[in-house]
Image: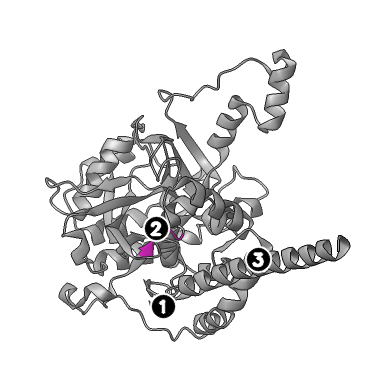
Amino acid sequence: MDSSSNPNPEAPSAPSTTIPHLRDALTDLTAHPYPVVPNPPELNNKKRASVALIIRIQPHYAHWPTADFVQERSQQPPKSPEQRLTEFFDQDWVQHGDPEILYIKRTTRLGDKWAGHIAFPGGRRDPEDADDQAAAVRETWEEVGLELSNSICIPTGNLPQRVVSARWGRLPLMVLCPYVFLITSPDLPPLRLQPTEVASAHFVSIRALSSPALRTYEYQDVSGRLWGNAGVSRWMIRNILGDMIFAAIRLHPSESIHCNSIDGFIPEGPPQHELSLFGKMSTWWHSKTTAQKALAEQKNLHLWGLTLGITADFLDLLPPHNSLRLWIYPTFTPWDVQLWIRLWTYMFRRQRRAELTKGYHQASLASDAESTADLAPGALPTSVQGEGLGVSRYYARAIQEKTGTRSMAIDGWIGGYYSLLQKGMATALLTRFGVVVVVVFVASKKYRNTFR
């Protein structure tokens, strides 16, 4: 549905073009869930986490659901998820609606590597959870106060599970399990955001997530994640390599809910014109006041990393199935480091582009016909936490089993890129060192000749 093409947004509109594809994708996910990925031996079968990708349909102004909608739905007998999906998408307000996905912004806390990140509701699986999906349901209730019960939603399967790791894939952290839920009620209960976990919640249209105009970059200091927290060495690496650049989406929410009980919700401090000369100089030196930083943080909604990877897995289920084409490989900010990384990865990227165009690359996840036992630990799908918090899953190529219905991501699409990236980094550092040696040698030689 594209409201910009309608000169009168209050007039009845044509049915959404996204809704039929969403219906096909969710129906297929429900009938053919992705296989469960077992824990690698290093995790001792304990560390698993689940997240909930929650979809709602925002009604169009001219196609609002009837007042007796909720009462009619509550009187219907229990039905299978497939039957419920069919009846839900047959409704007029749904066919003209705009599908949206719920994201949360994590609370900023010292020492928390996920602090301030855009994420899906979710968290660690507890021993009392019946399964991975139950963990997603429980965590959603705890974090945003949304009960994913049959009365207001339909569970519609899962997305590819993956092992999240750090240190270039050498340190497994957990198995991440995304589950998809469709809200069936147009009247969503008020969200209750957990102050210690969630700073804000945002509903974002799938149209906005697919818009090339909202593509951007995320700059991250990864020196601590990749080389430890040693002060001097981390400072040196940070100044030599700069920030790491990742693909991102600038979120454009249709609705945002902020947790008003967290510290810093209302910016504090004197008005700008009442600051002393020293205060104004300090503000100029640090670029922004505390209030300005707080407001900027509320607006800085960049979707990247793990959550971007899961979002891309979902978007690749919908036409035109080409979200991969709009993205870059991770790199660093200094131009010379970028140059060497591009040279080292040129053939790799060229080969992947050819595979993307032809679509011949074979999926490494087990197919629906394969059992979970066939998934060897060495072949587990992996997201490297240090390399963009799961960006490797985002760069996985989606191969369509049936056009317009289902995709299966190929793990390892970017596997091998990071080893080449490390070689590019090393070459850049050696080149810089060599330049310094040559400059020092030439300068010392001129100095000796001058005073000889």
Amino acid type for the residue under numbered disc 2: Gln
Say above or below: 352 vs 232: below
Q: Is residue 166 magenta?
A: no
Where is residue 293, by image quadrant?
Answer: top right
Q: Which mark is residue 222?
A: none
Residue at image position (52%, 22%) is 266
Residue at image position (25%, 61%) is 82
Q: Earlier in the sequence, mark 3 or mark 1?
A: 1
Q: Describe residue 335's horizontal placement relative to residue 218 as left or right.
A: right
Residue 109: x and y in percent read 41, 35
Q: Which residues are magenta?
A: 383-387
- Give the foreground label among 1 and 2: 2
Where is residue 193, by image quadrant?
Answer: top left
Q: Earlier in the sequence, mark 1 or mark 2?
A: 2
Q: Which residue is mark 1?
A: 399
Q: Which residue is mark 2?
A: 385
Distance between the alpha carbons at the discs numbered 3 and 2: 28 Å
Q: Secondary structure at mark 2?
A: loop
